[in-house]
Amino acid sequence: MSCFLLAGCLVWSLRVLYKTGLIVLNVQDTLEESLDVIDSRVDSIDRILDIPLFSDSPEIKSLRRDMIACREAITDVAFSMSSSMKPDLDLENSQPAEQQ
């Protein structure tokens, strides 16, 4: 009797572990796709921020500061979600921060 109970618990545990593993793999795939989108958006923001400002308007300067803050926030999220990215990379110079 106890063997059947143990076998039933083992089967149930394996089923739950399998379902959990599938959920983790789906979340990982979604995160990887999101990181690709984030990378492309950060590149787009960097290109826009490289354009020199020809207006001294406070609104434009404020918008530029907001875009820089957004870029940094997006980069922080990407660094925290990915172990393959190196957080010590300096975005301004595209060189590791240690070599400056």
Image (cartoon, rainbow, N blue to C red):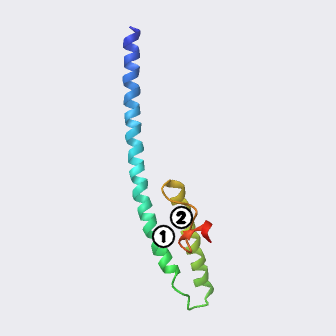
Residue 52 in percent (x, y) is at 54, 87
Q: Name the residue beneath numbered marker 1.
A: 42
In the displayed structure, does residue 4 sit left or right of residue 62? Answer: left
Quarter placement of the C terminus: bottom right
Q: Amino acid at mark 2?
A: Thr
Which corner quadrant of the image does residue 20 belong to? top left
Label 1 Cα crowd, 10 Å radius (few <14 / some 14-19 / many 20+): some
Question: Above or below — where is 25 with respect to 61?
Answer: above
Q: Name the residue beneath numbered marker 2.
A: 75
Residue 28 in percent (x, y) is at 42, 49
Instruction: Report, in whole angstroms, how far the alpha carbon at label 2 lies from the one at label 1.
Output: 7 Å
Give the residue displayed 50% in from the left and 54% down from the top.
Answer: 81
Question: Above or below — where is 18 with respect to 47?
Answer: above
Residue 69 in percent (x, y) is at 59, 70
Label 2 Cα crowd, 10 Å radius (few <14 / some 14-19 / many 20+): some
Question: Above or below — where is 75 with respect to 62?
Answer: above
Question: Dots 2 and 1: beta carbons under 8 Å?
Answer: yes
Q: Amino acid at mark 1?
A: Val
Give the residue displayed 36% in from the left and 23% down from the top.
Answer: 11
Closer-to-camera residue (62/93): 93
Quarter placement of the N terminus: top left
Give the residue displayed 41% in from the left and 16% down from the top.
Answer: 6
